[in-house]
């Protein structure tokens, strides 16, 4: 897909991976709608790239339906959706005091990371399916964000890993169904990337995390490297129905 002149939606675009992706898509000539629960962050990025900021809880059906309508009215039907919105607080299944994890703590992460991803996917796909086909019959591209934790979750990541594993599992049936509309679906599974989530981790623990990377080992990934992969996925029509690990060969240790 030639991105120039088309429209995109980036969820979680007010910071981290989503911000870098919104910026890079805009640099490619796309009109970008930034969905984020943090409207201040979304407004900041949108103001700097000439996009539109929309406050949205991706796990809420009504909020996302309103956001897709706002996006369509402001920039037209999106040809690209990048799902970056997510949360990941760590919590063990059983605490040191022997108390079970509250079910609502597990449910909240699944609601945002998995149900939120599907919520946005279903709405964007419906819009894309009605758009005029581009060269080769393509109508759109959807990129979901999983994590290496989908495959090797650490202690304390039961909810996060389950949610991201669900994102990986969603991809193939979505790709098979949406292919007849000319819509491609892919997933990126990042490892350790310098985002606000990672920056909150103590520095000594950050150094320990680097040791699980094979190469490069001296640094974490940068949000722009994720964004660059998103752009390549959109531009390379043969990429479809795969999960791409962006992780420097990381295999996460138990702790």
Image (cartoon, rainbow, N blue to C red):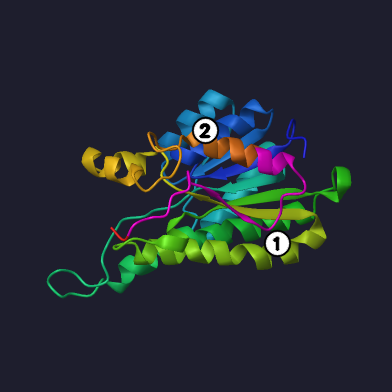
At 27% from the left edge and 62% from the top edge, which residue is drawn? Answer: 91
At 57% from the left edge and 43% from the top edge, which residue is drawn? Answer: 10
Q: Is residue 100 above or below residue 17?
A: below
Q: Residue furthest top?
A: 48
In the picture, the disc for residue 224 is 2
- Distance between the alpha carbons at the discs numbered 2 and 1: 26 Å
Quadrant in the picture for the N terminus: top right
**Quarter residue 78 falls in:** top right
Front one among 254 and 18:
254
Front one among 174 and 233:
233
Where residue 49 appears, as percent x and y from the top left, is 57, 26
Q: Residue furthest right?
A: 136
Front one among 137 and 30:
137
Which secondary structure type mostly characterizes the magenta part of the structure? loop
The magenta segment is 232-253
Where residue 16 appears, as percent x and y from the top left, is 44, 38
Front one among 193 and 70:
193
Q: Residue furthest left?
A: 97
Question: Few, some or many C-alpha atoms within 10 Å of disc 1 (few <14, some 14-19, many ≥20)?
Answer: many
Mark 1 and mark 2 in contact (Cβ < 8 Å)?
no
In the picture, the disc for residue 75 is none
**Quarter residue 3 falls in:** top right
Residue 236 is inside the magenta segment: yes
Q: Helix, strand, or loop for circle 2?
A: helix
Whichever of callouts 2 and 1 sits on the residue coming sooner in the sequence is: 1
At 55% from the left edge and 55% from the top edge, which residue is drawn? Answer: 64
At 25% from the left edge and 44% from the top edge, which residue is drawn? Answer: 205
| Residue 119 horizontal side relative to residue 110, left or right | right
The residue at which mark 1 appears reads as 175
Where residue 113 appears, as percent x and y from the top left, is 46, 58
Q: How many marks?
A: 2
């Amino acid at each position: 897909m030639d991105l120039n002149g088309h429209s995109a939606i980036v969820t979680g675009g007010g910071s981290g991976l989503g911000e870098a992706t919104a910026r890079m898509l805009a640099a490619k000539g796309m009109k970008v709608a930034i969905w984020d629960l943090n409207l201040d962050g979304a407004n900041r990025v949108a103001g700097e790239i000439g996009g539109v900021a929309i406050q949205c809880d991706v796990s809420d059906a009504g909020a996302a339906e309103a956001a897709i309508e706002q996006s369509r009215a402001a920039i037209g039907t999106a040809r690209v959706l990048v799902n970056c919105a997510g949360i990941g607080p760590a919590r063990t299944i059983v605490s040191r005091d022997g108390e079970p994890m509250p079910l609502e703590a597990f449910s909240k992460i699944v609601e945002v990371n998995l149900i939120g991803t599907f919520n946005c996917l279903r709405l964007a796909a419906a819009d894309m399916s009605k758009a005029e086909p581009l060269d080769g019959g393509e109508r759109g591209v959807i990129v979901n964000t999983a994590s290496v934790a989908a495959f090797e979750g650490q202690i304390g990541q039961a909810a996060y890993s389950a949610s991201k594993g669900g994102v990986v599992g969603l991809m193939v049936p979505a790709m098979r169904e949406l292919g007849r509309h000319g819509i491609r679906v892919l997933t990126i599974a990042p490892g350790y990337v310098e985002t606000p989530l990672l920056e909150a981790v103590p520095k000594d623990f950050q150094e320990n995390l680097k040791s699980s990377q094979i190469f490069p080992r001296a640094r974490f990934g940068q949000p722009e490297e994720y964004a660059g992969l998103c752009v390549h996925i959109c531009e390379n029509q043969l990429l479809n129905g795969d999960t791409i690990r962006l992780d420097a060969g990381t295999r996460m240790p138990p702790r």
